[in-house]
Image (cartoon, coloured by chain):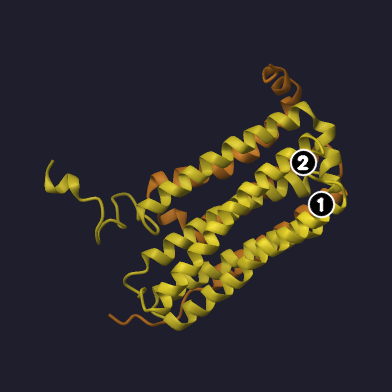
Amino acid sequence: MTANTMTVAGPDFEEAPGGRIPGNKGIWVGICCEFVEFLVLFVVYFVARAHFPEAFEKGAEGLSTTLGTVITLVMISSSFCIACSTALIRVGRRRASIAWLVGGLVLALGYPLAKIIEIQWNLAHGIDGQAGIFSGVYYYLTFNHMVHAVWGILGILWVLARHLAGGYTADDYSGLEALACYWHATDIIWLVIFSFFYVLV
Amino acid sequence: MHRESAAPLAPLVKTWLGLLALTGLSLLLGHGLHGQAGLQWLVAAILWLKGWLVIRHFIEADSAHPLIRRVLYGFITITPVLLLVTALFGRQLARLTTL
């Protein structure tokens, strides 16, 4: 193995031939795995919906559209804040970048909070894991997404700690950008879930 | 190297407002077209558009490596397509997936 073939990371890594790699290669392996996992879950959703269309129409009517919308607004706005944080560090505005990242974290924390309220609301209305095929698929998909979102929140905390310690500059912000990419991907997946469970009623 | 200058936040603000507007529109359509066949088409279109906005402006996929672009655009395209396939061929899909 030559030195060239062993080099998988370095300053020129992000500017790969054909286009740059936002963040780093590792995060894109994770994002691809996340997409594959959710695609499998979406296939389960579609097969279940094809078998039990009435159960899915009735089931969606029982969910709280308000809480689903709150989670959507939180995800979109948090993603926006983190995108701003990345754009600002790129031009050297470190303090503003940190402030936007804190904003993104605060909004992101609204997700588990809204989810807890939603679960309590569901249980009060008889929507538990044994309420039928719809609730089974709904809990499986949304719990899985929440796990991914919690990983993202932990990632934001880590990146914020590094940012406060001066770990990112206009010339080196790949860690912040990697976190941003993961959070945007998790946002996209939530937008799909929102459409499937809260809009298609 | 010191590169402090104005950050281009305006496109991000526009994207965020667009995402909020599309979320509101999808909710209005969901209530207004409750149970109607055309709803799936509109939801699929809005879903693709929201995904495109995030990918284009938040992730900046257009300047990314082609493989990353393909993964992202593939993901946001396949889910609305699957939604339409289920809406159009739900019975056949159910028959194909019956054990």
Q: Is residue A165 left or right of residue B40?
A: left
Label 2 sits on a secondary structure element that is helix
- Tell me, what hue is chain A? yellow
Identify residue for label 2: A135
Badge 2 or badge 1: first in the primary sequence: 1
Q: Position of residue B78 (x, y in %)?
A: 58, 38
Which label was assigned to residue A166?
none
Q: Which residue is mark 1?
A: A122
Mark 2: few, some, or many residues within 10 Å (few <14, many ≥20)? Answer: many
- Using the rendered image of the protein, determine whether residue B21 is visible from the camera's viewpoint: no
Q: Position of residue A200 (x, y in %)?
A: 78, 44
Q: Amino acid at mark 2?
A: Ser
Give residue B38's quadrant in the image. top right
Q: Badge 2 sits on which subunit?
A: A
Q: Are marks 2 and 1 on the same chain?
A: yes
Q: Colour of chain B?
A: orange
Q: Chain of mark 1?
A: A
Q: Is residue B91 left or right of residue A160?
A: right
Q: Which residue is pictured at 46% across the width and 61% down the height? A: A179
Instruction: Give the distance between the C-alpha atoms of the residues marked 2 and 1, in whole angstroms.
Output: 10 Å
Depth check, front residue: B44 or A46: A46
**Where's the N terminus of chain A, which quadrant?**
top left
Which residue is located at x 80 percent, y 37 percent? A56
* Circles 2, 1 touching at the beta carbon (< 8 Å): yes
**Label 1 residue SS:** helix
